[in-house]
Amino acid sequence: MPSMRSSDAAEKLESGSKLPAASLAANCHTKFGRLRFEPKTGLSAELLVDIRNVWWRESLLIVRDPFTLVFSLIQPLVFLALFGPLLTGVASETPFGGESTLQWFLPGVVVMITMFGTSMTGANLQFEIMTGSFERILATPLARPALVIGRALKELTPLVAQAAIITLVAVPFGFQLFPLHVVVGLLMLGVFGIGVGALSYALAIAARKTEWIFWAVQQSLLFPLLILSGMMLPLETGPAWMQALSRLNPLTYIVNAERVLFAGMVGMEVVYGFVAAFATAVIGLLVGVRAIRQATI
Amino acid sequence: MIQARTLTRTFRVGKEVIEAVRGVDLDVAEGELVAFLGPNGAGKSTTLRMLTSLLPPTSGTAIVDGVDVTRDPAGVRRRIGYIGQKEGAGHNYRVWDELRMQGLFYGMTPRDAAHRGEELLESLDLADLRMRKVSSLSGGQKRRLDIAMGLIHAPRLLFLDEPSTGMDPQNRANLWDHIMRIRREHGTTIVLTTHYLEEADTMAERVIIIDHGKIIADDTADALKRQQAGDRLIVVVPASQVDLARDQLDGATNGMETQPTAEGIALSLKVTAAAHAVPQVLGRLAAGGVEVVAASAKQPTLDDVFLNLTGRSLRDGDA
């Protein structure tokens, strides 16, 4: 039987190796399995393949049903069309750093799409936990970290696509486009979105037994974070305590950086923005992977 | 294939500690078809989830296909197929996508996964549904897709948790046809849980009865019924002739139960083989002048076995 041979080979390798036996895991007991040696920790080739597979399964939802992307554009477009003009009316002077309202408001809307989409993504996981498909996936040999990282990476696709479309839609209405700056801005949002997505998955796992807790936490965090980032209205005119809180909000740095980039400029804000984005991604993935390792669904 | 020793699992719910599984010892040889039978909450699924590495045991050890479930859970997952209680396929996906991705999750090459996927679609009557969305499938079709996904990597050991719960009799029979064919063709070792008595009785070669987290019986269904319950012969006689009948059946009245019925008194006798006991008993009663009103032979069920072991009926707790 071929399977016996491969496990024998693995044993020989294990006993002949200087590595502790536990650090090697032999595979291949099935006709289709392949022999693989997998270090227990660290980023291995296997982990990357697993991440790619998880990412692709998630992405299939968009590939097979691209209209979901289009529908998710309606809300930000409503904000842009109905909220933007009001801002212009309220602000008789130019509180927006001398830019046009659209130039100031659009980056905020783009950040908002990111936050809406990625913070809700845990609901998909919660649905899969409840129906049973996540248990089926847990029973496969996929590396646990891949289950979170692959899912979180998938957030990149819709997020960048949506942000790009919204930006292009605004051009005929007087938005001045700086393509290279926008690309850098979207990249930053992508990194940030991975972190928020991972946190959303961690929340879904923590709240797997009671669905409403997920929404309660998500909603009660989302709006304070958005408002305190100065996304919708400038905080410069707000009270001091709000300004203090906004400085603790990572989203503030993202919004500021996006505004600078979308205005076609570069500055320290961009550096702070990337720091905030990468910090969110690292923390999010650490929390998410931890949650999935401890979870017994 | 499986060696488990004093497997234990406790859960904490608030301040209460629930002992879901309390010291399970189990050996399953290659090619066996084993059913865990027990009421809801007996610890069947918890045991299965420990054997499949989905749930770490609180104490005890389990070696599954040569791999320790606590030391190398991923190794166990690679070697087994697992079909859970709930629906395995994502509702928003297409049948083919889920099946193919499942193969890739097991480390198969895209080519192998596609080839094997086609094979399984064909053999599980799913070929016409490949581009359908999972949410549009019927219950029976979803279950067959679950089976296909569980078999994509051709495991030698397959676990099924309550595979036929909630299915109508026709779909259940159909499901079993598929499972039995897989086993016949590939010699797959199968471990399943069920709370359907008939299912354990007719399908499994070995029945493990589990109650309150412990194995209380483990044998073939026939042997369990023979040892724990035995055949019964029931004769109904007029109330006035009960003592006469008792005298005539002297020596065979061990374990006799009497129960009044509309037609007289029913005497229930424990016998070794009911079919052979019928003419003998009737002959003896006739010789003594007892006018037998009715006679019937009753073969025991696994419920009788469970009743004898626990004092409770499995049907009472059947959800």
Image (spheres, rainbow, N blue to C red):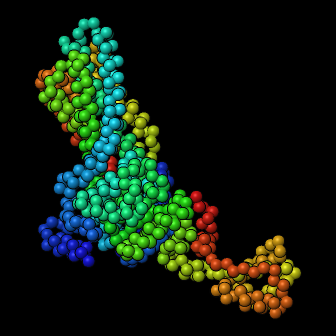
Q: In which quarter of the image is the C terminus of chain B?
A: bottom right
Q: In which quarter of the image is residue A251?
A: top left
**What is the x, y in percent for residue A183?**
16, 31
**What is the x, y in percent for residue A11?**
20, 73
Whether residue B213 is visible here, answered yes or no, is: no
Q: Quadrant of the N terminus of chain B?
A: bottom left
Find the residue positioned furthest to the bottom. B287
Residue at image location 33% in from the left, 64% down from the top: B119
Find the residue positioned furthest to the front. B128
**What is the x, y in percent for residue A247?**
25, 25
Please say if B38 is above or below A265.
below
- Relative side of A169 to B32, left or right: left
Residue at image location 30% in from the left, 73% down from the top: B66
Please say if A208 is above or below A16.
above
In this view of the protein, which residue sits in the foreground, B14 or B199? B199
Whether residue B129 is visible here, answered yes or no, is: yes
Find the residue positioned furthest to the right. B240
Please say if A43 is above or below A100.
below
Q: Quadrant of residue A123?
A: top left
Please say if A249 is above or below B269.
above
**What is the x, y in percent for residue A20?**
18, 66
* Marker count (numbered): 0
Find the residue positioned furthest to the top. A92
Residue at image location 34% in from the left, 41% down from the top: A65
Residue at image location 24% in from the left, 54% down from the top: A50
Q: Quadrant of residue B122?
A: bottom left
In this view of the protein, which residue sits in the foreground, B127 or A206? B127
